[in-house]
Amino acid sequence: MIVLVTRARKMNHRHELRTRITMRPFSAVTRSALQTRSWGRKLGRLLKGGEIIGLSGELGSGKTCFVRGMAEGLEVGKEAWIRSPSFTLINEYHGRLPFYHIDLYRVESRRELEELNLLEYLFADGVSAIEWFEHLPAEMVDEYLHIDFEYADGNRREMTFAAHGSRYDGIIKGLRVKGIKG
């Protein structure tokens, strides 16, 4: 069973300060990696291209597991093993849309971001999923879907979804409907 919590809560994230949330955030509690992955798959199926998905949370909180589900929803081939690009920084996959999995954990400066040509990925026709989104300078993107991952206890995770920009409101609505249906 997946529990939806439709309440706004304060999200500890510096991007909250620069872009207003355009729709009331909601939270989903998962009790296994399979459920976390299922939410990613639901999101992936809703995406049309050009979206930026910011993922925040502690190490091991479920970000990469969620991204694996997104890849399934974007119809990335089963032969592609989705893993965190901690050292490569950007992994590109091909499905029904180009899928850019970006990990900013090791990025320490704006110069490193510029050397990655990150803006070319963020504003391309594909989908960008950015782990450690809080490492991205606030002025680089102004519209995105932010997902905050928190340990609840044991295998339980709480994911809070917040739309920053009106283009993400429909995605939030779609996730709520898909979440209730299971």
Image (cartoon, rainbow, N blue to C red):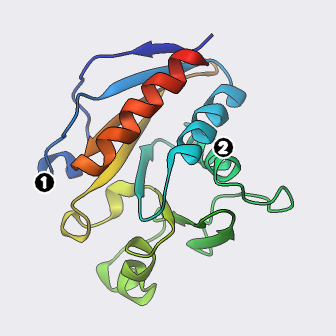
Q: Residue at x 42, y 65 (%)?
A: 50
- Mark 1 — residue? 18
Q: Which mark is residue 122?
A: none
Q: Residue at x 22, y 50 (%)?
A: 165
What separation in Å lies between label 1 and label 2 (alpha carbons)?
Answer: 29 Å
Q: Quadrant of residue 62?
A: top right
Q: Residue at x 65, y 62 (%)?
A: 96
Find disc 2 in the rendering and name its residue. Answer: 69
Picture coordinates of residue 179 (x, y %)? 52, 22
Q: Secondary structure at mark 1?
A: loop
Q: Quadrant of the C terminus?
A: top right
Q: Position of residue 154 (x, y in %)?
A: 62, 18
Give percent across and percent down for residue 54: 40, 52
In the rendered view, does 145 fall on the left or right side of 60? left
> Is 139 drawn above or below residue 69 in the view shown?
below
Residue under the image location 57 percent in, 73 percent down? 90
Q: Is 26 left or right of 72, judged from the image as shown?
A: left
- Left or right: 81, with 180 as reference point: right
Residue type at numbered disc 1: Arg
Q: Residue furthest bottom?
A: 115
